[in-house]
Image: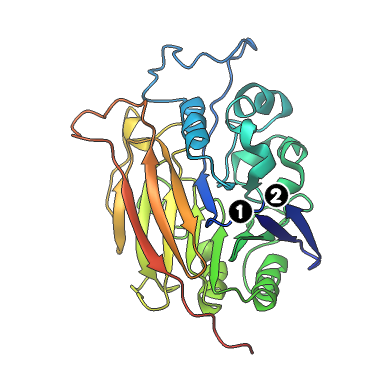
Amino acid sequence: MAVRVTDDDGDSDEDVGAVETRDPVITAAGDIACEPPPDGSTYNFNNGLGRDRVCRQEWTARLTEQINPDAVLMLGDAQYETATESKLAASYNPSWGRFLSKTWATAGGTHDLYGGGAFYDYFGDRAGPAPYSSFSVDIGAWHVISMTSNCSNANVGGCGPGSRWHEWLKNDLAANRSKCTLAFFHEPRWSSGKHGSGAKIAPYVSVLHEAGADVILQGHDHDYERFAPQDPEGNRDDDHGLESFVVGTGGKSVDGFSSTPPPLTRIANSAAFNRTTFGVLKMTLRSDSYGYEFVPDPQQSIPSGETARFTDSGSRSCHDAPPSP
């Protein structure tokens, strides 16, 4: 499979892997690695915090190994609570770090940016051609875009119309008119979870919708949620809407296991929701469609009150690309 990477200057490079005829498979999740032990000891996943409740990064990493995807999308907050060099080395690297060579990361979540730049030192060009830089790759027939959503950061300079990355996104989409397009960033445009919906991302979503993009993936809220296709205003739009997934279930914690779970009111078009199950989103990227499946951590006990491990699956055709301007 060949992967083409486009940076903020519009330059492209080939990352050539094994040639395969099957459709590429990707996995995605965010909010991954717990704070390592303060004494610097080897991380103990049964450290008294309750192994089914927190710190499941090793188990979701093993799950990802079993799936053996062609690419891994890291949806932000790889390392808690601050992404310093020592913490990444002690917690993220022994678990999800085993996929670093095929990981594409967000251009910075929230905790990712608390480590004085170590996040970018660790991921290198797997998180963009330079710190805080959005970028795009082609995976199979799909165009995949990693956007920075830390809009208030001075290094980002906002996400609204006229901002650097808003203009970059428009140009990138105009130059890469694939039938199928996926974008990922850390903070969700729509969410029923603890942090809720993020209006600051709305300008990105408007550009993606206008260009005929198909899917957006996000983390930040420690739950799983899938929204039916929507237009930028949040109206159901089965013909041209973006199907949106929140996958903050990579290992750090899930909100349903907190001592005081946040109130839950699902917002419009929320089609599937779970806040007690760790796991990853598996997607099969076909030339004109995609299949999706939330794959739960098989080692996690079935949460109290539930009769089976949560999962969610389906498929959808890609939109026709809009005509060239």
How far apart, in angstroms, are the residues tagged by discs 2 and 1?
9 Å
Checking the image for residue 17, the label placed there is 2
Locate residue 217, reporting x and y percent. Answer: 49, 55
How is the rendered protein coloured?
A: rainbow
Q: Amino acid at mark 2?
A: Gly
Please name whichever residue, 241 or 255, is drawn nearer the observer in this view of the structure. 241
Is the N terminus in the top left, top right, bottom left or bottom right quadrant?
Answer: bottom right
Q: Quadrant of residue 203?
A: bottom right
Is the C terminus in the top left, top right, bottom left or bottom right quadrant?
Answer: bottom right
Q: Say which residue label 1 marks.
A: 20
Picture residue at 46% right of the left edge, 27% below the top: 59
Locate residue 116, reporting x and y percent. Answer: 75, 36
Considering the numbered disc 2 on the image, is that residue within a helix, a strand or a loop? loop
Please name whichever residue, 182 or 31, is drawn nearer the observer in this view of the structure. 182
Any part of residue 267 in sight:
no
Q: Quadrant of residue 160?
A: bottom right
Q: How packed is label 1: few (under 14 Cα within 10 Å), some, or many (20 or more)?
A: few
Q: Quadrant of residue 235?
A: bottom left
Any part of residue 197 in sight:
yes
- State whether residue 309 is above or below residue 265: above
Checking the image for residue 258, the label placed there is none
Locate residue 113, reporting x and y percent. Answer: 67, 41
Whether label 2 touches label 1, CB < 8 Å:
no
Please name whichever residue, 213 or 119, is drawn nearer the observer in this view of the structure. 213
Locate residue 169, reporting x and y percent. Answer: 66, 69
Considering the numbered disc 1 on the image, is that residue within a helix, a strand or a loop? loop
Picture residue at 69% right of the left edge, 40% below the top: 101
Q: Is residue 124 left or right of residue 67?
A: right
Q: Amino acid at mark 1?
A: Glu
Of circles 2 and 1, which is in front?
1
- State whether residue 206 is above or below residue 294: below
